[in-house]
Amino acid sequence: MIVTPAAKATIGLGLTQIVGWGTTFLMPSVLGRHIERDLGLASEIVYGGITVMFGVGALFAPWVGRLLDRTGARTVMAVGSIVYALSLAALSFSQGLVSYLLCWAAMGIASTLALNTPASIALAQVAGARARQAIAVLAIVGGFASTVFWPVSEALEVFFGWRGVLLIYAAIHLLVCAPVHLLALPGRVPTGPQAAAGATAPAPPSPRSRQIFLLLAVSFSCGAFIFTGFIVHAIGVLRGLGHDPASALLLASLIGPAQVAVRVVELVFGHRYAISSSALFAAAVLPLGLGLAWLAGGNFAIALACLVGYGISNGLKAVLRATLPLALFGRAQFGTYLGRLALPQGIVSAAAPPVLAAVMTSYGAEGVLAVTFVVAMVALIATILLVRVSGTVR
């Protein structure tokens, strides 16, 4: 059986994305309490490492996007894996606040080189006209990062301690992910007919394209604020609405299956409808669910609808963050646009958890739902205006 370059890249990147998310963003969920105890840091500081990672990564994203347009993703992502390995190894030796946060800052650089955005750019370069399906597959696979790494981290910590686990993860990035990036991705940006399909020649931005970019940035950034911030506090919000701990955990656990299910639908049926239709649906279902929960979230069925709607919207947005800019701007400058879009998304992703934590402390679960509902409505309005300006996008 002949494996196409697109299939090889999708399989390889699926593996490295699971490792990338599982060893960084998801890692403190399991190892955080051990790090708190050994380093004497407050929980807010330990989880604040994620905020530092997103913030630093956002600052480098526009430059990395332009670099990927020029050179392709192979070397950039391999270097990112090496930086991940060095960062995690250094984190395993951290002794206090400064060294801990510096290691997370280094991971922010690594994430910009080797995590979500460069993976989408790599698939757009390799998969050509089938990039939408390839990116949907990558999103489906990436959704299993917590399923794989939460139990793995828990088991490894028993035998090796949290420092040993981080050294093991550093070795995986160095000995598995870096070689996979080098072997699964082409050495330069593809220039053949497959890569050229759907590409557009670089052109100076027109007033219309600037307007499209601004609306896209507002829509995606508002979504990033909710998706990054709400998930951290979901169980606390549900308990604040009156659900017992077991029910809150059950409801929150349904977010993952909803995300994966909608990505499968996008993969199988996405070619039958416009990308702009997916964007409108994802933008509409989120404020609907949050608004219902704000009004009557103590009801189990209402809370269930909210969490499933959240999962559906988040699952679609994970695909749309790459496929919608690709359809709107073409492949010629895809990395540049995606890098520029990643900057505001990264900043709000970094700010969202502490901001919603402050809202939770002062105004409770209803306050969090009110804030996220308003932000979701802004995203919906921006998406409606985007579709009006850009027209139907397939």
Image (tube, helix red, strand yellow):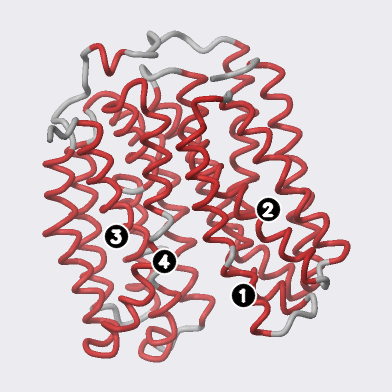
Query: Please, is residue 214 above or below residue 32 in the view?
Result: above
Residue 129 in the image: state x and y as whole percent: 36, 20
The residue labelled by disc 4 is 146
Q: CA distance from mark 1 to mark 4?
A: 16 Å
Label 4: how many residues lie within 10 Å, few (<14), some (14-19) or many (20+)?
many
Residue 1 in the image: state x and y as whole percent: 12, 35
* Mark 2 element type: helix
Q: CA distance from mark 4 to mark 2?
A: 20 Å
The residue labelled by disc 2 is 309
Q: Horizontally, is 216 left or right of 300 in the view?
A: left
Label 1: how many residues lie within 10 Å, few (<14), some (14-19) or many (20+)?
few
Q: Nearer the viewer, residue 61 or 24?
A: 24
Q: Which image quadrant: the C terminus?
A: top right
Question: Which amino acid type is marked by label 2?
Answer: Gly
* Mark 4 element type: helix
Question: Which amino acid type is marked by label 1?
Answer: Leu
Q: CA distance from mark 1 to mark 2?
A: 15 Å
- Mark carried by residue 19: 3
Q: Earlier in the sequence, mark 4 or mark 2?
A: 4
Q: Are marks 4 and 2 in contact (CB under 8 Å)?
A: no
Q: Nearer the viewer, residue 287 or 219?
A: 287
Q: Earlier in the sequence, mark 2 or mark 3?
A: 3
Question: Which amino acid type is marked by label 4?
Answer: Ser
Q: Quadrant of residue 274?
A: top right
Q: Are marks 2 and 3 in contact (CB under 8 Å)?
A: no
Q: Earlier in the sequence, mark 3 or mark 1?
A: 3
Q: Quadrant of residue 186?
A: top left
